[in-house]
Image: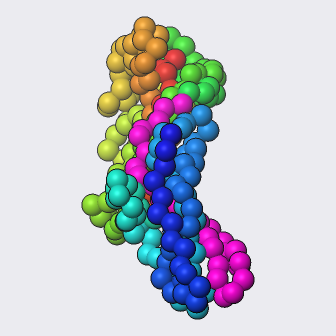
Amino acid sequence: MSVTSVTFYPGAGVAFTAVATVGPMEWQAPFPGVTDKVLFRQTFQQNISSWSPLAMSSTYTGAGYTNFVLVRESDFRPIGGGQHQWSRYYAITPADRVEYTTMAAQFPGYQNIRDPINASSMAKITLDYFLVTDFTIGGPNVPDLADATVVTFSSDNTAPLLSGVELTTSTNFTISTYISKVSADRASKSSFSITAEAQTLNRWEGNFYERRTVQVKAK
């Protein structure tokens, strides 16, 4: 597969006062087992005295890839003559990813039917991505984060569903509704009724952030 690159070789006596592209686009594997074209690096060269940092999330200027933004710059490599080379990394928003694992939890008991149980459940981990340009809490670019599924006993008394509570006086989970979730999760491989923990947000690359959601099957 061909790649796009623009290479500048100034003649004798011409300094790299402006940033010059001196290497092709090199596609990187963004995640283990994923080869989508969402992250690449490219080598640049410039006179050391002329260098200044490029703002994070600056748009790539190469034809056909202007939807990519800067996420990282590598360390510099001196090459003599007052010149240095380094790599810039550019990315776009990755597609959502889904991974599966197992998770141990204490599942609720049913009043007069069973005590809470400790069991392992299949867990679904959903990872989605956001380019955050405004870090104001609650700003338009900061994704919302949901709490774990909870049982509400009263307006001021809640408990995580995976905490071994008994569904005795719950106002939003009766025993029958919980059993229906158990049945649904058993009947479908794609059904995961319980959000096992609060969603988290972590940096992936540059100003791209990854939101992690963990769901398990009711038992």
Residue 219 part of the magenta-drawn span? no
Q: Kindly indicate the quadrant of the structure image that contains residue 140.
A: bottom left
Which of the two residues, 116 or 198, is positioned nearer the viewer here? 198
* Residue 161 screen position, x and y as percent: 47, 32
Q: Kindly indicate the quadrant of the structure image that contains residue 157.
A: top left
* Residue 173 screen position, x and y as percent: 36, 26
- How did the renderer colour the structure? rainbow
Q: Residue at x 56, y 52 (%)?
A: 26
Residue 203 in sight from this viewpoint? no
* Residue 109 screen position, x and y as percent: 52, 20
Which of the two residues, 124 or 65, is positioned nearer the viewer here? 65
* Outermost top residue: 187
Q: Main secondary structure of the magenta part?
A: strand
* Outermost front residue: 12
* Residue 202 screen position, x and y as percent: 52, 55
Q: Residue at x 55, y 36 (%)?
A: 34
Q: Residue at x 71, y 78 (%)?
A: 79
Tell me where the magenta segment starts and ends, as one range: 74-99
Q: Look at the picture and state if 90 lies above or below 14.
A: above
Q: Residue at x 58, y 89 (%)?
A: 13
Q: Look at the picture and state if 98 lies above or below 59.
A: above
Residue 13 in sight from this viewpoint? yes
120 to the left or right of 181: right
Residue 92 part of the magenta-drawn span? yes
Which of the two residues, 19 or 147, is positioned nearer the viewer here? 19
Which of the two residues, 72 or 26, is positioned nearer the viewer here? 26
Q: Kindly indicate the quadrant of the structure image that contains residue 41.
A: bottom right
Q: Look at the picture and state if 12 lies above or below 96.
A: below
